[in-house]
């Protein structure tokens, strides 16, 4: 059987395929694709976020950006998909409830912006996915 799609209980996840169309052994092109993904993630977040060099959550989960409540981390699977997760920092105490309450809306807004850079897919089951649909802005009720 294959590898199931990545999922983390403390975040919302999409996946991208930044290496699609690249030669498997072209290390420089793959490094450039990783760099471009990191830059796109950073560009979709405000100045309240900091880049995080060389920080890991669990095996294979690299934290790339962090603010006071949330983190964005990347996880590459064996099919060369990169799962981008917007989630709750694991080191929170007093503000964890706030982080949990605000995470879904902030994650979706982040993914709406990231979709301008990449085609995003979402997990629909352990083995299936679908294209992520960008949310439409809510209209104010008069």
Image (spheres, rainbow, N blue to C red):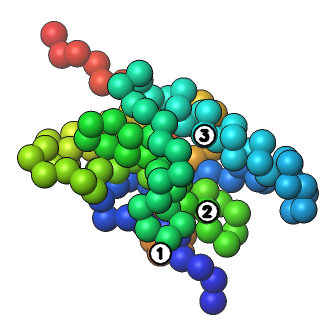
Extreme residue toward the front, this view: 54
Is 120 displayed left or right of 73 in the figure?
right
The answer, for residue 118, to whether it is visible in the render is no
> What residue lies at 47% left-to-right and 59% top-to-bottom?
56
In the rendered image, is residue 79 in sight? Answer: yes
Specify which label sits upstream in the sequence, 1 or 2.
2
Dot 3 alpha-carbon crowd within 10 angstroms: few under 14, some 14 to 19, many 20 or more: some
The residue depicted at 28 percent of the width and 19 percent of the height is 139
Instruction: Give me the C-alpha separation between circle 2 and circle 3.
Output: 13 Å
Q: Secondary structure at mark 1?
A: loop
Q: Which mark is residue 38?
A: 3
Secondary structure under tag 3 reads: helix
Name the spot of residue 64 as percent of width and height, x first.
Answer: 50, 45
Labels 1, 2: front one: 2
Kindly identify which residue carries mark 1: 126
The x, y position of residue 121, in whole percent, is 56, 53
Q: What x and y, as percent, mark residue 86?
A: 40, 47
């Amino acid at each position: 059987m294959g590898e199931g799609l990545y999922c983390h209980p403390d975040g919302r996840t999409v996946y991208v395929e930044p290496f699609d169309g690249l030669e498997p052994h072209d290390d420089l092109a793959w490094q450039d694709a990783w760099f471009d993904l990191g830059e796109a993630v950073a560009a979709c977040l405000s100045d309240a976020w900091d880049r995080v060099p060389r920080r890991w959550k669990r095996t294979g989960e690299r934290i790339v950006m962090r603010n006071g409540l949330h983190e964005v981390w990347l996880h590459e699977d064996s099919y060369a998909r990169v799962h981008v997760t917007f989630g709750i920092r694991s080191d929170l105490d007093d503000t964890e409830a706030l982080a949990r309450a605000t995470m879904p809306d902030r994650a979706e807004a982040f993914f709406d912006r990231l979709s301008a850079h990449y085609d995003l897919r979402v997990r629909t089951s352990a083995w299936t996915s679908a294209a992520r649909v960008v949310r439409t802005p809510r209209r104010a009720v008069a």
